[in-house]
Amino acid sequence: MSDHYVKVKVQLEQLKSTGEVGEVEAAEVEQVSTETPPASLSPVPAALEVRRDTAKTLGTARNRSKSRTKLGNANIKPDAPVLSHLDNAPSLRIKGTGKVLQEKAEANGNVVSSQTQNDTKSAQSKEDANKLPKKRRPVTVDTSKAKTSLEALKLSIRQLKWKEFPTGRRAACDIYWHGVSFHDNENIVSGQVNKFPGMVEMLRKINLSRAVRTMQELFPEEYNFYPRSWILPEEYQIFATQIRLAKECDSSSPRPTFIVKPDSGSQGDGIYLIRDPSDLRSVATGGLGGGSGAVRQAVVQEYMQRPLLIDKLKFDVRLYVLVRSLEPLEIYVAKEGLSRFCTEPYQEPSAKNLHRVFMHLTNYSLNVQSGNFVHSDSRSTGSKRTFSSVLGRLASKGADVKRVWSDIIALVIKTVIALVPELKVFYQADIPPGRPGPTCFQILGFDILLMKNLKPVLLEVNSNPSMRIEHEQEVAPGVFEYVPSPVDEEVKVGVIRDTLRLMDPLKKQHTTVAEQEEILVEAGSVEKACPAGEELALPSLCLKQVFPKYTKQFSHLRSVDRIASLFLRFLGVKGTMRMGPTGFRTFIRNCKLSNSSLSMASVDILYIDITRRWAGMLPDSREAGMTLQAFVEAFFYLAGRRFKSLPLREQVLSLLEQCESALQGPGGQDDNKPRPPRLSHAPSINPAAIKTNSPAPARRSHDYRLHQTLRPTAKGNTEH
């Protein structure tokens, strides 16, 4: 019997007599547990095992000590006696501490302590853990206010493997999906909301017409895609006079037709056609132009009588546009849309067919009630088809579909640019600078009509486009059920899913090289999948950035945006939407616009006159002060007084330069306030995808450059 074995036996007897077996057993159990693969034991069960084993006998301890030799060395628990005869390896017990260092000879003859081995293993395990990819937490989406878009939204969230909260959540979510407006939930102070404050108000028929009309005054050749419009009831007399004069000047030409759209109407509700101002329907009481009734607020537009027909049917295009941010302005256009067809063959309007809505109006909500409406599972047949199928059909007949896409992109960008100035005023009113609040984005529905010459015409813009992916169908007499619509699902789920991907708050880099390519216009074209980690299983993005990508082609159109920056600067109290007389006087004084011909008394009179007139045009408003629209009118007036010899556009640009120069302090620094942000410049546009024409000569200065514009071709401008 070796001396080492004798020493071990004596030590065991001493431990048995003093009751320290449990401590030995605890050390043994810890050795076994640390040598077991990590997947088989967790820390809590190991602790429970220690408690159970401390009550076992010395014989059990000896048996486990023998089995433990097969597992190899392990970490040594401090202050616990250790029994070991592993390969007769020598051990060193540190007196007074109870610590034992078990040594093991390596192949080269060196002796390495078990403590050193354990430290090495621990360092390796930490290094391996750092190499493992960290699984990010899922993005959280509050869908409690989603309403009609709920089914498409649920499918999108499942495809992205995100976390949905259908009844809301006490803690903050990453994204809130509202069904109607930004104010669906008033208590959001963080995250992202899929609505902009004021977008619903801005996209009503009257406000949209006013915004586009302001741009038509400055850039008539750029904004010829919107039909002639009159606002009722305030412009009834102007409308009636112009129609009468047109008839007297050219009595041989066919009588024009007009379409009347209620200001806040939707889904075709209240829309009708007329051929004479006297045909306007009157409601309520009072008088309008000597009539017996008062026309409710509406927009009357020139009816486009020569639309492009397919299968002898009139149709329009519902195109989805994502406004990702206002500052800086980011716009994305879906490369797929919906073509919505009428259900009766088209005839030019006449007194006999003005009432036939299934022939003249393309609204889905109207035509679905027709007995001729066809629900189809095909992308290229039925009363609702994909836009790419229509483009493919046009391409097969020799049409230049790239030019069609180019003109549509220009229409979208110009329309959003017209809306942005007032949207910024709404935004700062609900989310003032420096206060907590969510960031916003929004999907818009553009309704576009293609004319015979393929020129696109803007019909309207919807702030809440329908995202339903099912339709109601009568499966038995009087029995209806919702049936999935493959065409709707293909288009709408892709738009929502890819909007969420772009707005992913946990994704550091939102765009890839593939996303910066030109929009593909060939029917059925498919791009390469985005190699972005966990999105490998998802299709490529169906949304393509068009701004700021084409900034150079459209930056010259942002004059009103610069005027809005001045307006916001002199509002005085942040969070308000109207400028008071003091703010207006401060604007005049700081921009050095007053002189001998424009005294401050004249400035006060100008403020009162314009503010009162706009208050009469906005009867629902109870807040006093000058709106942005009134401020723009006052700015135009001041520009005309100061630069009489120039055209209106040059007048406005010259006054803008003067104001911005006056607001800059010595050395080019602003006087204690940040200067309105300058526009960023995007990469030049690809001529193969977008056609451009040379601009007309324009006034140039150190901070204004008139870039090439992306505009429809000459052929496209002939249709009105």
Image: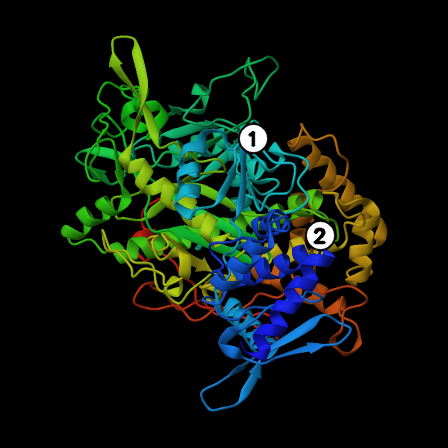
Q: Nearer the viewer, residue 325 or 563?
A: 325
Seen in the picture, residue 51 relative to 664 is either above or below; the reply is above
Please tell me which residue is depicted at 44% across the width and 53% down the height of the picture. 332
- Image quarter of residue 561: bottom right
Decide if residue 719 is on the left or right side of residue 512: left
Instruction: In the displayed orientation, state which residue is furthest to the left.
Output: 397
Gap in angstroms between the C-alphas marked 1 and 2: 40 Å
Please tell me which residue is depicted at 67% across the width and 51% down the height of the picture. 637
Circle 1 residue: 167
In the drawing, what numbered circle is on residue 567?
2
Q: Nearer the viewer, residue 569 or 613?
A: 569
Q: Nearer the viewer, mark 1 or mark 2?
A: 1
Seen in the picture, residue 434 relative to 246 is either above or below; the reply is below
The amino acid marked with disc number 1 is Thr
Q: Secondary structure at mark 1?
A: loop
> 10 Å neighbourhood of mark 2: few (<14), some, or many (≥20)?
many
Residue 377: image x %, image y %?
Answer: 21, 33
Please tell me which residue is depicted at 68% across the width and 76% down the height of the picture. 93
